[in-house]
Amino acid sequence: MKLASFHDGGSTRIGLVEGDEIVDLATGDDRLPSDLIPLIAAGEDGRAAISRAADRARRLPLSSVRLGPPIASPRKFLGLALNYRSHIEELRAQGVAIPEHQIWFNKQVTALNGPYEPIHLPRASSQLDYEGELAIVIGKRARHVRGREARSIIAGFMVCNDVSVRDWQRRSPTGTLGKSFDTHGPVGPWLTTIDEAPEPEGLNIKTWVDGELRQNGDTSEMTYSFEAMIEELTTVFTLEPGDILTTGTPRGVGGGFHPPRFLTVGQSVKVAIEGLGHIENTVIAEPE
């Protein structure tokens, strides 16, 4: 399934994307929740409810609605740094020390943004950068997950741009400040459930800026597997349905160029992942 959140007629609704149409699930069953997290948490029962509603729901052209972030209110929005071998080498060449363990940071949930909404160039910085990434969405409450059990708690995958403000990232050892400016977490365009997702360990991931290909990597470059990520996190705390985990970026970020090629107002950033779709966001000045 490809599950989406969309705006229509002044309300936010949930939908099932099929080809160039979106199925307005609430018109098939008005008892369904208005966001996807409860349906994800319900597992098989949630998928069955979606299928039943879809059989009698109205269909709209996908082009006629405005998509929002598929998961609009997660409890956690976490990112893994330095996970792609090509990006590690890119930073090692700049003298960045490479840690021996997984390095996770928070993106505040207020950074979440829709797949085609603008992103802000902050008034506080001009060092605005992009990071095309694969995002995991958690489907079950879990702690102390080990090995192959990890796949059973994944609801599905999304495309993400882990937008970063580099000078603010450096001023905080956790990286959180530079990763959490409002609008700097566009995700989507929909949640592809794990049962219909392509094999996630070998997906091509590309990022373009104004049509220029900047990143061209593959998820097979990841140092840490999905199992290793989930083991690490659930050793410390409970993961919950709807939690978003971004999994690192390949080489080609703006800060990796000499001189750096940071984003400016008017530029458009497109991130595409094989089999999962694409997101595209235009940079605007941060509003007053």
Image (spheres, rainbow, N blue to C red):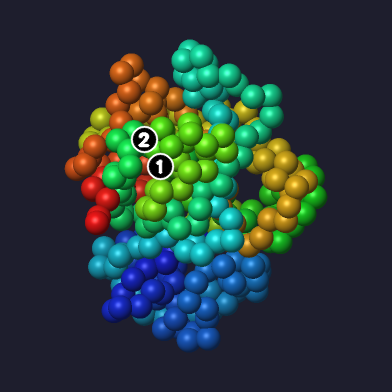
| Residue at image location 56% in from the left, 47% down from the top | 106
| Residue at image location 49% in from the left, 24% down from the top | 87
The answer to which of 156 and 105 lies nearer the viewer is: 105
Res. 134 mark: none
* Label 1 CA crowd tier, 10 Å (few <14, some 14–19, many 20+): many
Q: Is residue 200 above or below residue 42?
A: above
Amino acid type, callout 2: Asp
Helix, strand or loop status at disc 1: loop
Residue 89 is at least partly visible in this image: no
State the residue position of label 1.
163
Q: Is residue 218 above or below residue 145?
A: above
Q: Position of residue 109 (x, y in %)?
A: 50, 57
| Residue at image location 24% in from the left, 56% down from the top | 288
Q: Is residue 30 above or below residue 108?
A: below
Q: Position of residue 107 (x, y in %)?
A: 51, 48
| Residue at image location 75% in from the left, 47% down from the top | 236
Q: Earlier in the sequence, mark 2 or mark 1?
A: 2
The answer to which of 2 and 14 lies nearer the viewer is: 14
Answer with the quarter of the image where residue 220 lies. top right
Res. 129 mark: 2
Drawn side of residue 263 relative to residue 74, left or right: left
Q: Is residue 97 above or below residue 270?
A: above
Amino acid type, callout 1: Val
Answer with the quarter of the image where residue 243 lies. bottom right
Drawn side of residue 83 relative to residue 272, left or right: right
Query: In whole angstroms, how far apart are the C-alphas of marks 2 and 1?
Result: 6 Å
Q: Position of residue 78 (x, y in %)?
A: 57, 47
Whether tag 2 and tag 1 are in contact, CB under 8 A, the answer is yes
